[in-house]
Amino acid sequence: MLYPTPIAKLIESFSKLPGIGIKTATRLAFYTIGMSDEDVNEFAKNLLSAKRELTYCSVCGNLTDDDPCNICTDATRDLSTILVVEESKDVSAMEKIQEYHGLYHVLHGLISPMNGVSPDDINLKTLITRLMDTEVKEVIIATNATADGEATSMYISRVLKPAGIKVTRLARGLAVGSDIEYADEVTLLRAIENRTEL
Ligand SMILES: [Zn+2]
């Protein structure tokens, strides 16, 4: 079916989002057109400002509107621990349980020999730089329990251990292949408490 160009373009934009097929994109496009001018303006404004105002923290790699981010600059945080995660979403999941008070490092990916992703392709060099001139004593690896998560964890542990830094991994309360982002709070809490040294 042929739609007027503006709506066809809107459908195309929605269909670029993950998990949105053409049917859902069409439904969302028509829904958007039915919204009030005020709501549509707000929606467009939020999209643009999220894109313009957010950046990645130059220290930890977390998504932030302030660089360094408010976790890196928080004087009450425990500077001796860095928890390493794959994505910014994992930082939010961890912060929600309010039990971890150290710092973070966001890798923006995982080492994946199968997919040709090497250590240089992720945000790993800055982690090693951070460890040189800080009082970090423990690095907790909290990558997901997948093959790539394991490969990344093994690599980091191999690089950091000779430097005398304690490297631990979240306990296997998390099921194999499971996503930290979706783990419930009790599971996540237990995984931190029962972390094992690598
Ligand atoms: Zn930061």
Image (cartoon, rainbow, N blue to C red):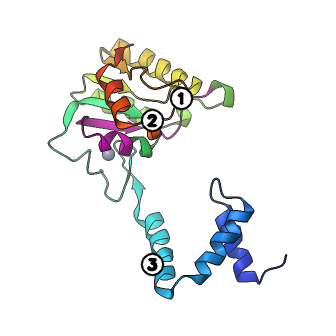
Q: Is residue 47 above or below residue 63?
A: below
Instruction: Give amino acid for label 2.
Output: Ile
- Closest to the observer: 142 or 96? 96
Q: Position of residue 147 (x, y in %)?
A: 58, 23
Q: Quadrant of residue 4?
A: bottom right
- The numbered mark, 1 or 2, whose residue comes first in the sequence reads 1
Q: Nearer the viewer, mark 3 or mark 1?
A: 3
Secondary structure state at the residue bearing disc 3:
helix
Secondary structure state at the residue bearing disc 2:
helix
Task: State how many labels appear.
Answer: 3
**Mark 3 Cα-neighbour bin, 10 Å: few <14, some 14–19, many ≥20:** few
Tell me the CA gap for discs 3 and 1: 40 Å
- Residue placed under numbered mark 1 in the picture: 119
Query: Looking at the rendered structure, which numbered label has been put on residue 149?
Result: none
Q: Is residue 52 above or below residue 108?
A: below
- Residue placed under numbered mark 2 in the picture: 180
Q: Is residue 111 magenta?
A: yes
Q: Which residues are magenta?
A: 91-112
Instruction: Give amino acid for label 3.
Output: Glu
Q: Nearer the viewer, mark 1 or mark 2?
A: 2
Tell me the CA gap for discs 1 and 2: 21 Å
